[in-house]
Amino acid sequence: MGLTCSRLLLPVLLLITAGGCVSTGTFDRKVAEVATLTQETARLRQEGADRVRSEGDRVAELAELASRVTALTVLNRKCEADRKVVEGLLRAKEDTLSTTVIDLRQKNAELAGSNLSLKQDMDALLKSRSGDVRKTGSIYEELLGLMKDEVARGEATVSELQGTLTVTLFEPLLFDPGAADLKPTAGATLRKLAGYLNGVKGKGIRVEGDTETVLSASWSLQKYPSGWELAAARAVTVARALQQEGVSPLLLSAVSHGEYRPLSDNISELGRARNRRIQLVIIPKE
């Protein structure tokens, strides 16, 4: 635009100068004005170009911002959807935890009740066992006094272990070697035992038979081929004798251990003699 203006002004100036109507000072001033206008025109053109470029940059920036806004909008919607999902999960978890807490509190209350009940049962059991121990100690003393003669002769023993009372009757007191029939002298001992056991409440009597490992020459091997049979026959014989003396059969049981539960060794005669025995085990009644 500046170049065009200069081209238009120059012929005018030339005409004016050629016509002699304009002085030299005026001409120079006009030329300066033309130069100034030219520069101003160039400046304006540059500003216009810069303005066009700035406008383009702003358009690009606006487009980028619009893209970012769109992306942020999409991200915000996704975050909102995720937030709702998380809130739903948290509510479900809270409901579950609330239910669990209620259940745990109920179970805790039940356990507290059970603990109280168990404590009461334990106290009652300890009290009962304390009474049983005192009662067992009393029975032990009475049985020991009752059997003092047989104990003194070495024919019997009375023992107590963890609340279980045992009266051991060795073979010479009850039977001949290899036999399961009671000796005549055994009746008095079993009679006084039966009389005492009838008065013991809440107890049962387990009659246990034991033998030795060496078969006696006097045994009838056809009748008692092993210690099992002989010990069983002796236990049943004693149980039956106690029943005949008035002990309820509901309190009695008979057991055979054969030679497999020795008190002593089976090498010496004294050891074998201790293994041939009947034991009356006084146990709590089932």
Image (cartoon, helix red, strand yellow):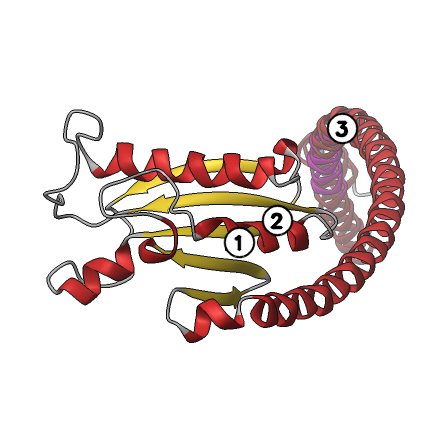
Q: Which residue is pictured at 86% across the width and 43% down the height?
A: 110
Q: Quadrant of the C terminus?
A: top right
Q: Which residue is pictured at 36% across the width and 38% down the height?
A: 181
Local packing at callout 2 (Cα closer than 10 Å; few below 14, some 14-19, many 20+) is some
Residue 11 visible in the picture: no
Q: Position of residue 104 (x, y in %)?
A: 83, 42
Tell me if residue 48 is in the magenta stretch: yes
Q: CA distance from mark 2 to mark 3?
A: 87 Å
Question: Which residue is labeled 1 in the image?
Answer: 188
Q: Which residue is pictured at 49% across the width and 59% down the height?
A: 167
Q: With 181 as the anchor, is 141 left or right in this view? A: right
Q: Earlier in the sequence, mark 2 or mark 3?
A: 3
Q: Position of residue 233 (x, y in %)?
A: 35, 33
Tell me if residue 59 is in the magenta stretch: yes
Q: With 206 as the anchor, is 94 left or right in this view? A: right
Front tag of 2 and 1: 1
Front tag of 1 and 3: 1
Question: Which residue is labeled 3 in the image?
Answer: 82
Question: Which residue is labeled 2 in the image?
Answer: 194
Labels 1 and 3 touching (C-beta < 8 A): no
Q: Quadrant of the N terminus?
A: top right
The foreground one among 258 and 233 is 233
